[in-house]
Amino acid sequence: MNKMLQQIQVVLFSPEIAIPDKLKLAHCINEATSGQFNGDPMILPIPDDAPQEIPRIQLRSKDGQHILSVTKIRLDYVLQSPGDHDSLSLPDTDLFERIAAILLYMKDSGHAQITRCGIMTNWVIGLDKGPAANHLLSTYIKDQTAIIDPIELELHCLTNNTVANRKVNFWTHLRSARKKSDPEQDAFVAILMDMNTSAELPSDFDEDSVQAFLKESSCIMNSTLGKHIAAMEAVQ
């Protein structure tokens, strides 16, 4: 049984992000991250009264691995694994330092106060044999269930945790998956983990607290993944 981390996404939430000069903001963020976003920035022609969730700026690296979207209320930093290469792992210290640098610039420049933080990770687990839907059924659902020979199966779990002294919601989603290039190969389980600080208890994040949150969250996600892999291996 093998695992691959396909994507890490970190989100910084703000009550309001000021974007008076989109091109200047894009340039300054690129400088703050030591030129990480060396591709051409996308400055989107969005009217000021458009929904706040729509990105105003999108930055990316030339290789497409690093993508940053800026809306009026959040920054989304996505780090993607190139192709099928197993090149991502948790914790990603370099990524977390770049996130802290962006946060520091946004706070010091007066563009935003960061009140919430979240991290999502997407994994693919390769089983020794399929089908994955039946394997999930055998691992997580009791005998006597009315579910028989499913083609696809999804499981969702929400827990509450305390991470870096902050209350968080922790979602774990598991689903059976197939290889895109060959749908007959169905011995895969996709696992998405999403941990974010509570919207009911906003905080004031600085570069130290956001790094502490991301590092502790990474440890919990690694541990959670290991437990799921162990559970699936026990029924192979």
Image: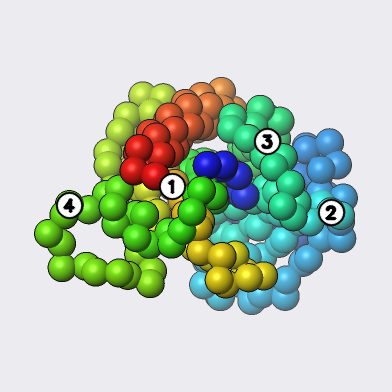
Q: What residue type is labelled 4?
A: Lys
Q: Which of marks 2 and 4 is nearer the N terminus?
A: 2
Quick check: 81 left or right of 35?
left
C-alpha separation, residue under disc 4 versus residue under disc 1: 26 Å
Asked if marks 2 and 3 touch (Cβ < 8 Å), the reply is: no
- Say which element carries label 4: loop
C-alpha separation, residue under disc 2 versus residue under disc 3: 16 Å
What number of labels is visible?
A: 4
Which residue is denoted by mark 3 in the rendering? 95
**Residue 105 rendering spot, x and y as whole percentages:** 69, 37
**Residue 73 rendering spot, x and y as whole percentages:** 52, 56
- Say which element carries label 2: loop
From the viewer's perspective, is residue 179 above or below residue 116?
Answer: below
Q: Which residue is drawn at 71% across and 62% down?
A: 57
- Say which element carries label 1: strand
* Mark drawn on residue 194: 1
Q: Residue at x 46, y 58 (%)?
A: 130
Mark 2 or 3, closer to the camera = 2
Q: Which amino acid does label 1 sit on?
A: Asp
Which residue is denoted by mark 2 in the rendering? 63
Mark 3 or 4, closer to the camera = 4
C-alpha separation, residue under disc 2 versus residue under disc 1: 25 Å
Q: How crowded is mark 4: few (under 14 residues within 10 Å), some or many (20 or more)?
A: few
Q: Which of marks 1 and 3 is nearer the N terminus?
A: 3
Q: Which residue is drawn at 87% across and 50% down?
A: 38
The image quadrant where one finds the C terminus is top left
Q: How crowded is mark 2: few (under 14 residues within 10 Å), some or many (20 or more)?
A: few
Q: Which amino acid does label 3 sit on?
A: Leu
Which residue is denoted by mark 4 in the rendering? 142
**Residue 87 rendering spot, x and y as whole percentages:** 72, 40
